Image: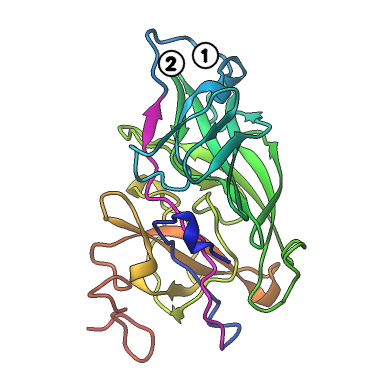
Amino acid sequence: MINASHGVKIFSVVATLGLLATGCSAPKFEPKALTPTVVPMPSEEAPEIKSLRDADLGNTTWIDPMSPSDEENKIKLVDSKATDEFNSYKLGKIVYADLNGDGVEDAVAPFESTSGNAYWEHYVPWIATEDGPVQVLDEIGYSHNCGSNVDSVVPAKQGVIVTEYLRSEFQNTACAENGPLKQVRTVAVEQSDGDEQYHLVRQDSHGGYGGYCHPEPDGVTIAVQLPIYAAPHEKSEIPVKPGMMLGYVSGPQEMARLSEDEQWVLASALIRDEKAEGGMTNVCAWLPTIENPLYSEGEPVVNEHGKLAG
C-alpha cells in the first residue's frame, strides 16, 4: 500500500488487530508526520482575519505534507500549482469550517501531489490567526492510489466530518475500487494554554487522535490499563470508565510515531463498544513514553497474566 519511492520518511504505529485474526503482518498505518508545529504565513502586517476565505492559499508557501517534520522542505504555490524535479502539486477545492471553535472560518485544503504513477491527496488544515493563516503540520486524512480514499470532507459545528474508505487485510479489493472499510470521523483542531502547537483531535465516538487512524491495528494486545490522551499533553486525557479498556496494541517501536520531543507515542487502545463489530473498537491515542510499560527498552513490561511486571 505504501509507495516507498515517494520519499516517505516516517511511519506511524500500525497494523492488524491481534484479538480478531492471525497471520496478518502488513502494517495498516501509513507514513505520518511528527507532532504538528506552527508555520505562520509571512506578512508585513498582521491582518485581522474574519475567515480564511479572505486568504489566498493558492499563492502561499506550504510545508510539504509528505515531510512536514522538515520545515525547510517548502513548496511555493503560484496560481494553485507548483512543480519540482520529481513532483507536481495542485491545490484542490478548499472546505471552510471553524476547526478550533473560535467562531472564525478556518480551512481544510486538499493538496495533490503526483510523481509518475503515484498519486496523493493530503487534506491539510489551516487555522485563521491574528498573524495570518497558519498551516497545521499534520493531515486530517489522505487519498492514495491503490490505498485509502477520502470520499468527502464537510463542515461540522466544530471541525469537519470526514468520510473515507480504507483497505482491509481481510478483504481483497481491486485497485480501482474503494476499500471495504467505511469510516466516518469528526475532527477538530485544538491548542492548549501555553502550547504553540496545534493538534488534531476526534470529536466523535470515544475521541482520540484526529488524524489517519486505521481500525485494524497490528501487533500484540496487552491487557494493561493506562491513561490515554487525545493530544500529546496531559490536559487531553480521554475519560475511560473502569472495565471499558481491553488493552493496548503493542507494535514495533521502530515504526512508531513519536512526538517532536519524544515524550509521547501514538498507539492503539481497544475499547469495549457494543455497537461495533466484535464488541470492541480501536482508538488511536497518545501515550507518554516515560514510565510507560509499553515503551520500556523496546518491550512491554507485563507478566503472563497481562499485569504490570513487578
Number of other residues with Cα within 10 Å of mark 2, as a class: few under 14, some 14 to 19, many 20 or more: few
In front here: 232 or 303?
Answer: 232
Q: Secondary structure at mark 2?
A: loop
Position in image of residue 100 (x %, y %) = 52, 32
Left or right of residue 181: residue 237 = left
Residue 99: where, in percent of width, then height? 56, 33
Disc number for residue 29:
none
Q: Which mark is residue 49?
A: 1
Residue 89: give x, y in percent of width and height. 57, 38
The region drawn magenta spans 23-40
Instruction: Residue type at mark 2: give it.
Output: Glu
Residue at 54 percent of width and 39 percent of height = 124
Residue 130, disc: 2
Can the viewer see residue 142 in this picture?
Answer: yes
Task: Tell me: residue 229, above or below residue 4.
Answer: above
The amino acid on which the numbered mark 1 sits, given as a three-letter code, is: Ile
Tell me which corner region of the image, top left, top right, bottom left or bottom right, holds residue 93: top right
Q: Secondary structure at mark 1?
A: loop
Magenta span main SS: loop
On screen, residue 127 above or below 89? above
Q: Nearer the viewer, residue 61 or 160?
A: 61
Above or below residue 285? Residue 155 is: above
Please report whichever mark, 2 or 1, sits nearer to the chain's N-terminal start: 1
Q: In the image, is residue 129 part of the stretch drawn in magenta?
A: no
Asked whether 30 falls inside the magenta stretch, the response is yes
Whole-Å distance between the Cαs marked 2 and 1? 6 Å
